[in-house]
Structure formats: structure tokens, C-alpha cells
Image (tube, rainbow, N blue to C red):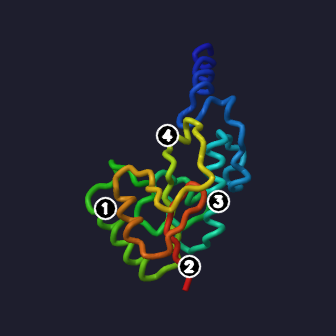
Amino acid sequence: MLVALQLVNAHDAAPYADRPQARLTHDLGDIAPSLLWVRTNPSVHAYLAQLRDCVAQYPAAKVAIMPDNAFAYPALDLRNPFPMDWVLPLEVVGDTEQRMLDTIGELNRDGDYLVLFQTVTALALAAGEPVPASVPPETRPAYHTGLEERILDRLTGRRITCGNFVGVYSAKS
């Protein structure tokens, strides 16, 4: 029993990828109903509010958010056009990189897409660092592999900024 209590206390003091429990002051239920009762720090909440608002501001059938946002597709009911949800170096194997790049041609041809790139790293969010309300258009995305920048540079839709995100938007024709 003592070990269990110590484990709970250790978890509450230093949870994975967020602040200590006492600093988890924002419920994510206002971001998406599926996230109700999930508490996080103010920085993560601001980041996700920006993400929600960007998706609403730039409606599209196909939405990708790179590189650290795999949870967003089911949580926000989004359809990711790319063959991978989380662009991590250990997952970009075999022909994955080429399949990701091939998807760009389909998006450019068909339109009706929004591809967002975060400019704030997951580590900064977990540390509770501030999330900028906006970024200049020339801001480069946070990335793990460099594939994110190649995707950004090859998409032919309209360049946008939205909150801390840079992106490319092509409205439905």
C-alpha cells in the first residue's frame, strides 16, 4: 500500500509530458467533447484552442497537423490525408517518406485541404512555455525529420498563419 501511494504521489508531481497535477488547471472539454475531464496546463490548452479555431476558420475535407498531433484526428474528427499521423524519425521507414511526398501531388490536384505545422515544440508545451498568439508567415515549423518542411514547401495552396501555426490551405473548388 505504501508503494502504491508513493507511486501515485510521484506521478502527480511529475506526469509524463505535462506539468505537475496542481498546475493542470484547464479542462479540454471546451476544445472537444471527447476531451472532457482531461486537464492540462494553460499552454497546452491555448495551443489546442488555436488548433480548434484554425480548423474552424479554414474548413476542409482533409486536414493534417504536423508533426506532434496524432491525437487530434480522432479527438476533433479530422481526416488526415497523409499515410502517417505522427512524423517521427523511427516511423519514417521504407517507402514512408515517398508515400508522404506522393500525397502532396494528390492534395495539390484535388484541393480541399488544410495542412498545419506547429511552430511550438511538444517539449515547450509540456514545460508550460507560452504559446504565441500569432507568428509571422516566414516562421518555420517545428520538425523531427525535415520531411515537414519539404511538405510545406511543395504544397501549392494559399500560405496561412493561424495562432502559432503556419500552414497551407486550399478551399473546396
Crowd around label 3: few <14 · some 14–19 · many ≥20 (10 Å): some
Q: Which mark is residue 48?
A: none
Along the line of sight, the residue nearer the viewer: 36 or 135: 135
In the rendered view, would you say 155 is above or below 74?
Answer: below
In the rendered structure, which amino acid carries the disc numbered 3? Arg
Q: Which mark is residue 52?
A: 3
* Residue annotated with mark 4: 123
* Residue annotated with mark 2: 171
Crowd around label 1: few <14 · some 14–19 · many ≥20 (10 Å): some
In the rendered structure, which amino acid carries the disc numbered 4? Leu
Separation of marks 2 and 4 at Cα, in angstroms = 32 Å
Mark 2 or 1, which is nearer the eye?
2
**SS at mark 1 in the image:** helix
Separation of marks 1 and 4 at Cα, in angstroms = 24 Å
- Residue at image location 51% in from the left, 53% down from the top: 69
Query: In the image, residue 18 lies at what x, y percent?
Result: 58, 36
Q: Quadrant of residue 25?
A: top right
In the rendered structure, which amino acid carries the disc numbered 1? Glu
